[in-house]
Structure formats: C-alpha cells, structure tokens
Amino acid sequence: MQSNSGKYSFVIRPLLYVMDLFIILTLATKLMAVSRGYLIFCCYMIASWLITAMGLGFYKVYRFTPLLRVGYLLLKQFVIFTLLVFAFFGFYKELNPSFAILANYILLCFGGIGLLHILLFVLLKKYRIFVRRNIRRVVILGENAKTKRLKDFFGNPEYGYQIIKTFDFKTKQTNIDEIIEFVINEDIDEIYCSIAELKNTEINRMVDFAENNLKTIKFLPDNKEILSRKLNYQYYGITPILSLRNIPLDAPLYAFLKRSLDIVISLLVIVGILWWLTIILAIIINRQSGLSVFFMQKRTGLDNKPFYCYKYRSMAEVKSTEQVEKNDQRVTKIGRFIRKTSIDELPQFINVLKGEMSTVGPRPHPLYQTDFYHLRVDRFMIRHLIKPGITGLAQVSGYRGEVASDMDIKNRVRFDIFYIENWSILMDLRIMIKTIINAIKGDEKAY
C-alpha cells in the first residue's frame, strides 16, 4: 500500500537553509558592492548563521509545533543575527555603512525570512487538511486515558496524522506478531506504545522490529511508575544519575528573565491602569457595601510561606473558610462584573512588584485550603516550589475558581506541576495571551 506520509519532508529543512542564506546574502548587496569585503561578509554570515541556527534549534519546527513558537524562534534567531552583523562591521573597518543602512538590512532580512517560514508553516498545514498528503500513518498500542488524549490530539487534521488502528490489550488477546504483520502490510510510519500495557519482552520486540524496518517508535509512559515523571539525567563522573525532576526556574538566568518580565509588566499595569481604576472602584464599592476597595487574605506562597494577597473587594462579607459559589449572594453588583472579567485580580500586580508573586504561576490558595489539600492530594505541595501567579496554566486550561470536586483540585495540581517542570518564557506569554482572551470573552467559571 502506498503511503502519503511525506517521505520527502527531509528536503524542506535543507531547502530552508539555502533560501534563508540566499535572502541574507542577496540583501547584503544593499550594504556594499560585490567586492572582497562582500565575499568575506558572505563567508562570515554563512558560517555564523549555520552555527547559531543549529545551536538555537531555529529549524527544529515540527508538524505539531505551535505557530507562537515559530515566532519565538524567529525572534531569538534574529537577536543573535543582529549582534553578528554589528560585530562584523565593528571589526571590519574597511566597510563603514551607517546605522540606518544596517538597521534597514536587518529588518529586511527578518521580514523576508520570517514571512518565508510562517508562510511555509501555514501552507503545509493547509496542504495536509485539503490535499490530505504529507500524512503520517500511525498505530497505537494500548487503550487508556493517555492513548485517548493522544488520539484526540491526532484528530486535528492540520498536524497530518492518520490513526490506522488502536490495539487494545485489555479486552482481547493481541499478538505482537499480528501487530508487526499489520504494520508492514499497512505501511505504517509511526508506532506509539503505552508502556503500561506492554511487557518488557513485548517492548523489546517492538523496538527491535522498528529499528530493523526503519519505523519510528515512541512511548507513552506508565501512569503510575517513575517513567511518567520528567526526570533529569546527569553524570557523576561516568556514573549516570536520575533525579526526580528538573525545575528550569532554579537556573539563575531563567529566574532573572522571569523576574525582569514580572517587574516590567507589573509597572505597566500599576502606572497605566491600577491607579485610576482604584479610584473609580473605591467610590462604587464604598457606595454598594460601605467597605474599603481592597480585600487582603493570607495565602500560601513560595516555600510554603504565607503572604497577604491583594484583591479588589467583590463581596459584602467574606468568611475565611468558605469558597465562592455560583450565584453566591455575598457577591455585590460591581463584584459580579469585576469577577467575571478578572479585574478583581489586578491589585496582585502589587504583590508581583513586591516579589511575593509572579505574573504566571500556580494560583495561591488560602492557608486553610493548603492545610486541607496537602494531606489529601498527592504532590500538592510541589506547587510551592516556585512563586504563585496571578494566572496559570491550570486556570487557562479550565481549572480556575471553585473546587467543586476532587478531580478539580487533582487536575489543577497536575497542570501546575507540568508548568513548573516545563517552564519557558514562551509558555508564560501564551498563558498571558490566553488569560486576556478569556477575560474579554468572560470565563464561565469566573463567579
């Protein structure tokens, strides 16, 4: 059976290298005439572009890569590109183009290469949807919650995956020889195995088959065992060591970047919005409830240390051990509006500026909830390894507000741990954008 799996996709990446360098070198004629200096610049740019692009993973864009990450890679690459261009003309004094000419050259390169990459990225997605080629044929070994999520992911046609069959080891006797025969006969490209449902001998058999038949094999980790965690692999001398988790924000550089972003955003919000909004809300809130504009509550912060979390007052009365419920009679008229639009959270940018919170992170719980949940929810306290946030991955994934069931808090913890172990500036920006969109639309759980 012929497969439309896009077996010539390996051509795209080298072609992009060539086209990017063509843009860089062609536009360089705007800086200088074709001469000895131009040839030196070409050699310098070819070498430095290839080295930095490979080092930064600029071309590591896959069919499942989000468009926002493509933009992030472009921006990162062109920051380095800008430094390289200025460094060259700083050392090579024979050529002396003006700052305006250099800036124009860099912007043209950025625009040309950026347009090329984004256009190709979007066109490939449309090509997979409408032409139904460049498709990866896959089989899934196992039937459980994780394989179901994987099938849902593959259901998006723009990623270009086609699930040919799922083998269920629980409800029927499945033979590895039958799977291997099926993979060969149906010209399967990728095999996804759930470790939880295969024996070690079966896994080894599938690995041997895949490697000997040029098939891609990937694994879904066990739900319960250590493999389901994000392990950090290191060498002590020549002895391999696995540590339980790697927290990116433990690195001083990443912590500095996140804190810098927090300071900039909090200052913009406080100076641009908070001061005048506080005056308006203070008048309205005082008329409706006779109380002050701010509400302060002790919540759990970094390393389980308590701090006072600021909010705009949205309720006429607050009992320290009662959650806000849907249609809660304690919420005032203005309170319903500011809670629906998440405006009540804006004073927490003061907490961010003070260093008690971050713009993005696990939401801080009141102290009584921390005391309650840490004894009942597995790995709950891991949330306090980093600063709490005004918004977070759990909140934009549907787990904000009232904890109505055990699954709400368990899923919130699951998303928080994923965020802690996989943090990046890009992830923070995506969460911020999604938070703003939800605030404008009005989150159904914001009450």
Image: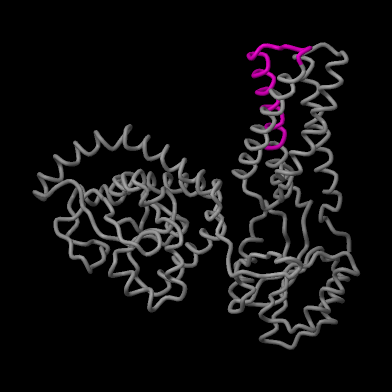
Magenta-colored span: 93-118
Q: Is residue 430 magenta?
A: no
Q: Quadrant of the N terminus?
A: bottom right
Between 96 and 34, the one lying in front of the other is 96
Outermost residue, right side: 212
Location of residue 111 with respect to 144 vertically, above or below: above
Q: Residue at x 58, y 66 (%)?
A: 245
Location of residue 406 with respect to 48 vertically, above or below: below
Outermost residue, bottom side: 173
Q: Position of residue 4 (x, y in %)?
A: 83, 55
Q: Main secondary structure of the magenta part?
A: helix
**Side of 148 relative to 235 (left or right):** left
Q: Position of residue 128 (x, y in %)?
A: 73, 49
**Side of 413 relative to 43 (left or right):** left
Q: Residue at x 38, y 78 (%)?
A: 375
Quadrant of the rendered image containing residue 208: bottom right
Q: Is residue 103 magenta?
A: yes
Q: Residue at x 71, y 31 (%)?
A: 113
